[in-house]
Amino acid sequence: MAHGMATDAPSALEGSGTHEGSVIGSHASLKSAEACSEPEVEYMQYSSEELLQGIIDLISLDLSEPYSIFTYRYFINTWPQLCYLAVIRHPGGGIPTVVGTIVCKQDTHRSGGVRGYIAMLAVRADMRKRKMGSQLVKLAVRAMRDGGCDEAVLETEVTNIGALRLYEGLGFVRDKRLHRYYLNGNDAYRLKVWFNRPQIDGPSLPPESETIADLQ
């Protein structure tokens, strides 16, 4: 599926109920050389339908292929625990502005293992190069690992150098090349990372790895 330029170096068919959200932490705003403060970014799990349009609007800016609202609801309402957002809250309250998001799922693979899948990742253009994409991936992959997944996978366009750099910097490896995978005719790389497994299929990450799982 699609991965926007949610980079640090350069990116439900039924139901609409809400889920309890939890604030994961806040990212202290970076300051420019002139010491000008920037908006504080807060990381949180998806918590209610009111956040959905913000997710759609952000991801739609960088899509490799179009999605219907049913696709978003399928992922987000089925696996809300695997959807994380970076938001900016407004002093007067109201719906926070979504400036980054990751949307995932997990299920049993035909091999018998439990696989986590990163379907969508996007960060607003003016909020990039702040390690926001890396933080969102770490939060989602930790949730996959804690939820019993054996591995996490994703696809991204072979031309998306920023996304490749982000994921490979976190420990993902290129598993295979998928020819003409996207509707635009571009090829994709399937990237994969394993949790707590012998190095038979590929590298394994311990629970407290300094890449994916180290969120301290």
Image (cartoon, rainbow, N blue to C red):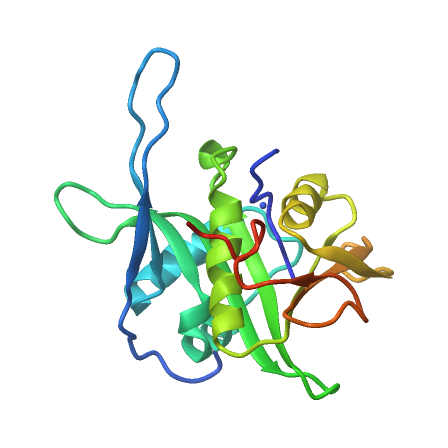
**Where does the image place residue 30, in percent across and percent down from the top left?**
37, 28
Name above or below for residue 138 compared with residue 69.
Answer: above
**Where does the image place residue 121, in percent across and percent down from the top left?**
55, 54
Please give the name of the residue rendered at 76% of the width and 54% of the height, measured from the top-left corner. 184
Residue 105 in which image quadrant: bottom right
Which quadrant is home to the N terminus? Answer: bottom right
**Where does the image place residue 188, in percent across and percent down from the top left?**
78, 56
Q: Is residue 57 left or right of residue 11?
A: left
Name above or below for residue 79 compared with residue 179.
Answer: below
Residue 117 in which image quadrant: bottom right
Please give the name of the residue rendered at 72% of the width and 40% of the height, measured from the top-left corner. 161
Q: Residue furthest top?
A: 34
Please give the name of the residue rendered at 81% of the width and 71% of the height, measured from the top-left corner. 200
Judging depth in this view, the residue of 93 and 154 nearest the camera is 154
Q: Is residue 84 left or right of residue 115?
A: left
Judging depth in this view, the residue of 94 and 113 nearest the camera is 113
Please give the name of the residue rendered at 57% of the width and 64% of the height, measured from the top-left corner. 67
